[in-house]
Image: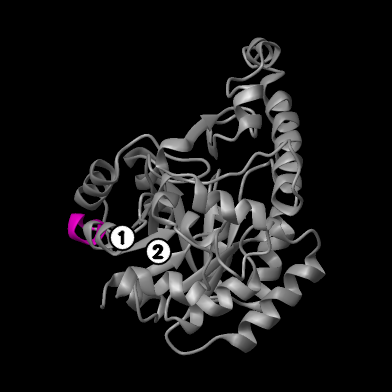
Amino acid sequence: MQTKLTELLSISHPIIMAPMFLVSNVAMVTEAMKSGIAGCIPALNYRTLPELKAAIEVLKREKVSGGAFGFNLIVNKSNPKFKAQLELLCQEGCDFIITSLGSPAETIKQAHKVGIKVFCDVTDLNYAKKVEGLGADALIAVNDLAGGHRGSLSPKALIQELTLNCNIPVISAGGVGTKSDFEQMLTLGAEGVSIGSPFIASEEANVTAEYKQACVDYGAKDIVMTERISGTPCTVINTPYVQQIGTAQPWYERVLNKHRKLKKWVKMVRFSIGMRATEKAAKQATYKTVWVAGPSIEHTTSILPVKAIVARFLN
């Protein structure tokens, strides 16, 4: 199956294993590449630059024909490691970078100097046109069925709006849990898909067995939006603990967020607290569990190797 995405990354199938905070790792991406797709890891999954460099070195050794690997960069001020991470990626090399939460201008400029493709997360046409103007190689169209921080438009509405008005490839992100979902996105005009949540329940994912099993036991109806992780609505599994604490932003944060000078700092504090809680839930089982996932876990019925999950979308 050849599309503009397979041409851009020299991969066999137009699928990217989406970058997932605390979930994505070298073992998962290695198996993704062996299956003929691309895999992506958040750079923030590595606490230090030497750890990130070591991951790149392994992936370069493990890369096979028909596969590709990349990293996700948070490109705004909430990520103080951004510039150093970008510099390292450009020095060591990778196939592509996915940018999130900010202007990709510097990333595009530096990455293109060394032949790295840059794809940008977008949720609407306005931002898509901006990143296209900056030279992005493709758009990651984050729709309202995506896991984590999702968009507000349906897959159909977002894909059609972007393909009609932009001249670079559109990669649909969100709502792909089956082969028919995958094929539908291509029919709507996407050049490929970015799939995340179905891979949480993979043997290679380095998260707790409880997190993986939750993706098996819960379904689309159990996914809710919470403001208690980063201050921005985020999809999580509606566990008893999530039900206990509620999903709305605390009243004092709502008040402080109306203050122009304090708003940025409130969001930074909430993001820090939320990320620590999410990390704890991913790495150890406690009753205070907040598991990030999207509605596509509806079709996850068992914990499988990455290669078997990829095959689900192709066969």
Q: Which mark is residue 137?
A: 2
Amino acid, disc 1? Ile
Circles 1 and 2 in contact, beta carbons < 8 Å: yes
- Which residue is the site of mark 1? 168
Query: Was residue 188 drawn as part of the magenta stretch in this picture?
Result: yes
- Magenta segment, which residues? 185-189
Asked whether the viewer can see residue 211, the reply is yes
Residue 92 against residue 142 in the figure, above or below:
below
- Rendering coords of residue 217 (x, y %): 51, 48
Residue, x 49% and y 44% (percent of image)?
Answer: 218
Q: Is residue 142 magenta?
A: no
Q: Secondary structure at mark 1?
A: loop
> Would residue 104 be seen by someone viewing this image from the given angle?
no
Label 1: how many Cα within 10 Å (few below 14, some 14–19, many 20+): some
Q: Judge from the rendering whether residue 37 lies leftward or rightward of residue 247; answer left or right.
A: left
Q: What residue type is disc 2 on?
A: Asp
Q: Residue at x 21, y 47 (%)?
A: 160
Label 2 sits on a secondary structure element that is loop
